Amino acid sequence: MSATGRAPLVRDGPGVAAWTALPERDRALLLWLVQGDVVTAELAALLAYGHRRIAQRRLARLREYGLLTGFWAANRQRPRGRYAYALTKLARAQLERLVWPGGKPVLGDGAIETVSPVIHQLATHDLFATFLRAVDRTRATGVCGWVPERACLRLAGGFVRPDALAVLRVGDRSIVLVIERDLGTERGGTLPEKVRRYRSLFARSQPIEPLHVGIVVDSARRLLSVRRILARADQPTGPIRVWLTTEQALVADAHAAPWSSPGGAERRTVDLEAHWVGDQWPLLGPGCLAEGDSLEVLDERVMGLVPGLAWLVR
């Protein structure tokens, strides 16, 4: 049965019987989508359901309930595309009232809340999936916080617009990595201007530990091209460190992947300079949305916990 004529499952609060009747994993995924925006069956399986077929069945049921819409996402860069799901307009409005009972925060300075096209968001989510799969609990190494693009808009009111922000743990060290996912469509001065904005923003802050801007590209050829552009235009100052790598390198080994600076220096992921974030955060891995308290390290609350970023959260 379609959602036509059906009363919404989510209304004004968490006490609504139909909402609480949903399995916990469904509710966690729906709440994550308030800021994660889009999900594939593969990613949903990794985050919450364990198996792709189970994820497909649950996503289909949530679509039947009128909470999700499904669509084929493709463009010239990704002509084969893939099937994705997103919250319906009504479900998003209702869930936002659960997330922000006092009203959704608005961006300052007239900034508009817009996010990248679906293909670009899915490419960034692929990096999140790569880090989740790479978790190494025996060495206490892996991702322990990940902020998707829409939540990153709360950083400086949209003055900078990261595609994601990651907190990585390597033993007792923490690395803060701002993600810029490049699909090869940006030309000229776009990337240098993004880097200039990061440097300008943090030049006004009190001295802090390094913050890494990681630009992830699709190929070694693109990496060399972007590195040349940045080497000509960038003026390294302050706590910002700029690095480039390829998606293939991260998929091969997310923790040992080589990152290169515009100036030619190289570091592995685990060797990037640390940024103190207080107590060690628990690692995230496959099934993280099934863990009751994981959502708080998957949205804008992460930025409020990271020294050097908290003053910028709006």
Image (cartoon, rainbow, N blue to C red):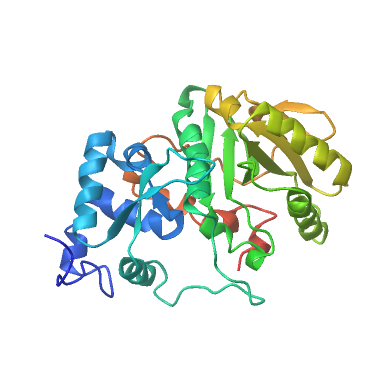
Q: Position of residue 22 (x, y in %)?
A: 19, 56
Q: Quadrant of residue 290?
A: top left
Q: Nearer the viewer, residue 242 or 295?
A: 242
Can you say whether 223 is above or below 208 in the image?
Answer: above
Which quarter of the figure is the N terminus placed in?
bottom left
Q: Position of residue 299 (x, y in %)?
A: 49, 55
Please give left or right for residue 77 compared with residue 72 in the image.
right
Q: Residue at x 58, y 50 (%)?
A: 163
Q: Residue at x 53, y 32 (%)?
A: 142
**Residue 282 makes an appearance in the image:** no
Can you say whether 105 is above or below 189 in the image?
Answer: below
Q: Position of residue 267 (x, y in %)?
A: 73, 27
Q: Residue at x 75, y 44 (%)?
A: 210
Q: Position of residue 218 (x, y in %)?
A: 61, 33
Which quarter of the figure is the C terminus placed in?
bottom right
Q: Nearer the viewer, residue 153 or 169?
A: 153
Can you say whether 247 is above or below 58 in the image?
Answer: above
Q: Residue at x 15, y 62 (%)?
A: 2
**Residue 13 makes an appearance in the image:** yes
Please give left or right for residue 45 compared with residue 112 in the image.
left
Q: How many marks?
A: 0
